[in-house]
């Protein structure tokens, strides 16, 4: 019996976009983010990060926490909607 992949819902899609958005704002490549994750004890390949950012791979809580730490934001910053005020970024700047 073949198993169907679990679909990524709206919150997962938003988180995927947020990871890429913050990573690019920080001037980091996927390779640099992967190296930072590995340095914190959660090895991730560039491919895994690419798949996460494209919503082709689920981001579990452990991944989210270490990605947020490397990006220098609280994990909730990757879960909550972007700030709607012009000139205000996800970190409130």
Image (cartoon, rainbow, N blue to C red):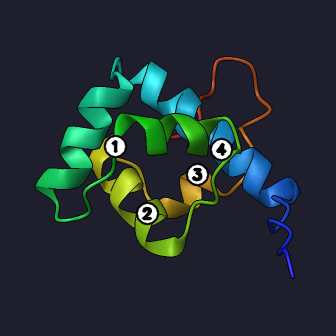
The image shows residue 43 at horizontal and vertical percentages of 25, 56
The CA distance from mark 1 to mark 2 is: 12 Å
Q: Counting residues from the N terminus, which is met first, the one under dot 1 or under dot 4? A: 4
| Number of the front mark, 1 or 3 | 1
Q: Residues within 10 Å of mark 4 (few under 14, many from 20)?
A: many
The image shows residue 63 at horizontal and vertical percentages of 43, 63
Q: For the point 66% across and 57% down, which residue is it?
A: 79
Q: Is residue 54 left or right of residue 26?
A: right
Viewer-closest of 17 and 76: 17
Q: Counting residues from the N terminus, which is met first, the one under dot 1 or under dot 2? A: 1
Q: For the point 55% across and 31% down, which residue is it?
A: 20
Q: For the point 63% across and 52% down, which residue is it?
A: 57
The CA distance from mark 3 to mark 4 is: 8 Å
| Number of the front mark, 1 or 4 | 1
Which residue matches tag 1? 45
Which residue matches tag 4? 16
Viewer-closest of 79 and 92: 79
Which residue matches tag 3? 78
């Amino acid at each position: 019996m073949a198993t169907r992949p679990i679909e990524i819902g709206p919150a997962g899609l938003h988180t995927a976009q947020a990871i890429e958005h913050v990573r690019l704002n920080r001037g980091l490549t996927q390779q640099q983010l992967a190296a930072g994750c590995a340095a914190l004890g959660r090895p991730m390949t560039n491919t895994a990060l690419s798949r996460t950012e494209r919503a082709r791979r689920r981001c579990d809580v452990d991944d989210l926490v270490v990605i947020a730490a490397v990006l220098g934001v609280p994990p909730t910053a990757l879960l909550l909607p972007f700030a709607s005020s012009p000139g205000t970024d996800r970190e409130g700047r």
